[in-house]
Amino acid sequence: SQTIHQWPATLVQPVGSPLSLECTVEGTSNPNLYWYRQAAGRGLQLLFYSVGIGQISSEVPQNLSASRPQDRQFILSSKKLLLSDSGFYLCAGTVNGYTFGSGTRLTVV
Amino acid sequence: EDQVTQSPEALRLQEGESSSLNCSYTVSGLRGLFWYRQDPGKGPEFLFTLYSAGEEKEKERLKATLTKKESFLHITAPKPEDSATYLCAVHSGGYQKVTFGTGTKLQVIP
């Protein structure tokens, strides 16, 4: 089956620490992949998208970066987390239409 | 720039009380309109994709319809387990991305 896996489910990190969230795709090749952030009570904000290995487009200037080292792997990173980076992060991809992973709740303390 | 507006922001229904959620959109070349259900603390769950005006799709108590300017998600005889936030999104022809509305939070009371 075609699915998107995302981990961890929850993460608590101190301000200034690094971040790495991973998203992997199963069951299909060459998907478009996306990272979204969802703040409480607000809509989904597109952060990055990728149409292929090494191809990253950034939608908003911020403290985060993304990489796509393999066709089915999409990574969201930060060198130094800020309090404002807290939120619910979702990976999505053109898998079975447009499918989401289960999300990561990041709390920066 | 693509825009998606959902209304109402919140909706409270009695069990069995049918209603509709609205999604108005402006896009440059619609490639698809998506409906999702999102439960608290979870990722959005795909419900429907609509591609052209006049198209309709159904799943259990849900029915999605599409016109050139808006989409409706009709909920017939809802049950408490239908309580969730429903998201609408559009995929436009000129972009490799999908634009989301802010959602309608539905609460169905027994």
Image (cartoon, rainbow, N blue to C red):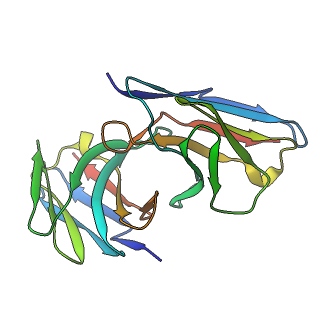
A107 to B11, vertically: above or below: above
Q: Toward the viewer: A61 or A68?
A: A68
Name the quadrant of the C terminus of chain A: top right
List x then y, in percent, for residue A66: 69, 43
List x then y, in percent, for residue A48: 61, 52
A52 to B85, vertically: above or below: above
Residue positioned 45% across, 35% down in the render = A30
Residue positioned 63% across, 61% down in the render = A59
Q: Toward the viewer: B14 or A81?
A: A81
List x then y, in percent, for residue B7: 33, 71
Residue positioned most to the right: A16
Q: Toward the viewer: A99 or B38?
A: A99
Q: Quadrant of residue B95?
A: bottom left
Q: Toward the viewer: A91 or B14?
A: A91
Q: Quadrant of residue B47?
A: top left
Describe residue B38's horizontal placement relative to residue A76 as left or right.
left
Describe residue A61's horizontal placement relative to residue A98 as left or right.
right
